[in-house]
Image: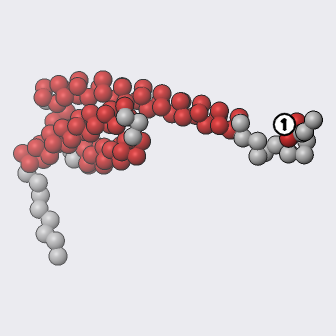
Amino acid sequence: MHKVTAMSANDAMEQAKANWEMYYTLSQELLKFIDKQDIDAFTELTRQRDVIVERMKALPETEVYRQTDECKALVEKIKPLDMQIIYKAKSWLNKSKRQNATVHAYDLQSVNPVGNILNRKY
């Protein structure tokens, strides 16, 4: 049987701080892996960052810590990273869609081979 103990206010603030710092670190890593176009690592880091966000939402002290000057400075570092991540992810997605459309433009399997002019021998 597990014993449930209440977290002290100081411990909760430390946890809130640790969550924000981890979010910042994961944001930096996301940017590195999207630059390398390592999409598997990128999606795993995104999953990890989502877990941190859920922890932040579940911890009431997150909002208290968010009002500190320390956290405000950290948020100012995070904002440009998030903007870059969003821009690069959208850019990668658009590039991927264009490549996929190009591949499908040359896909001749859906064309009836009997009536296809490319299959005729003259």
Residue that badge 1 annotates: 118
- Residue reaching furthest to the bottom: 1
Identify the residue at image location x=15%, y=39%: 17
Name the secondary structure under disc 1.
helix
Identify the residue at image location x=53%, y=30%: 95
Identify the residue at image location x=15%, y=42%: 18
Nearer to us in this view, 122 or 90: 122
The quadrant holding residue 116 is: top right
Question: Residue 89: percent from the left, percent from the top?
Answer: 44, 32
Nearer to us in this view, 80 or 119: 119
Nearer to us in this view, 50 or 84: 84
Question: Residue 48: percent from the left, percent from the top?
Answer: 31, 47
Question: Residue 58: percent from the left, percent from the top?
Answer: 26, 49
Residue 22 in the figure: left or right of residue 38: left
| Quarter of the image that includes the C terminus | top right
Say few, some or many: other residues with alpha carbon within 10 Å of mark 1 (under 14 / 14 to 19 / 20 or more). Answer: few
Nearer to us in this view, 118 or 66: 118
Q: Kindly identify the amino acid type of the residue bearing the numbered disc 1.
A: Leu
